[in-house]
């Protein structure tokens, strides 16, 4: 189980309803998916917050728009 914080209100099929800034422990695969969709952030764990208080996020690669 990994502790995450919701960045906004959303609902997840397996993890349930989240309120904005709610902190909850969820299964690792759910946490990774929600963080990947930018719906949540790690509270502590592999991508713990940096000294500045911001989550460590790799820069996004530029895409092409058609």
Image (spheres, rainbow, N blue to C red):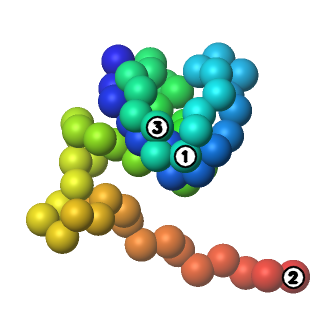
Which of the two marks, 2 or 3, is nearer to us in this view? 3
Crowding at label 3, few (<14), some or many (≥20) Cα neighbours within 10 Å? some
Query: Quadrant of the rendered structure where residue 26 is?
Result: top left
| Residues tagged 3 and 1 counted as in contact (Cβ below 8 A) | yes
Residue to which mark 2 is pinned: 66
Along the polypeptide, which appears first: circle 1 or circle 2? 1
Residue 33, horizontal then vertical, whole percent: 55, 37
Compared with residue 32, is residue 21 higher up or lower down, i.e. above or below? below
Q: Quadrant of the C terminus?
A: bottom right
Camera sees residue 62: yes
**Nearest the camera: 59 or 54?**
54
Residue 65, horizontal then vertical, whole percent: 79, 82
Compared with residue 42, is residue 31 higher up or lower down, i.e. above or below? above
Which structural element holds mark 3? loop
Residue to which mark 1 is pinned: 20
Which structural element holds mark 2? loop
Which of the two marks, 1 or 2, is nearer to us in this view? 1
22 lies left or right of 43 = right
- Tell me what residue is drawn at x 59 percent, y 21 percent: 15
Which structural element holds mark 1? loop
- Tell me what residue is drawn at x 64 percent, y 22 percent: 16
Q: CA distance from mark 1 to mark 2?
A: 33 Å
Residue to which mark 3 is pinned: 22
14 lies left or right of 31 = right
Residue 53, horizontal then vertical, whole percent: 22, 64
């Amino acid at each position: 189980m990994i502790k995450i914080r919701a960045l906004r209100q959303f609902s997840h099929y397996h993890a349930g309803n989240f309120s904005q800034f709610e902190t909850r422990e969820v299964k690792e695969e759910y946490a990774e998916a929600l963080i990947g969709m930018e719906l949540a952030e790690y509270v502590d764990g592999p991508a713990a917050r940096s000294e500045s208080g911001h989550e460590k996020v790799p820069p996004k690669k530029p895409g092409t728009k058609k």
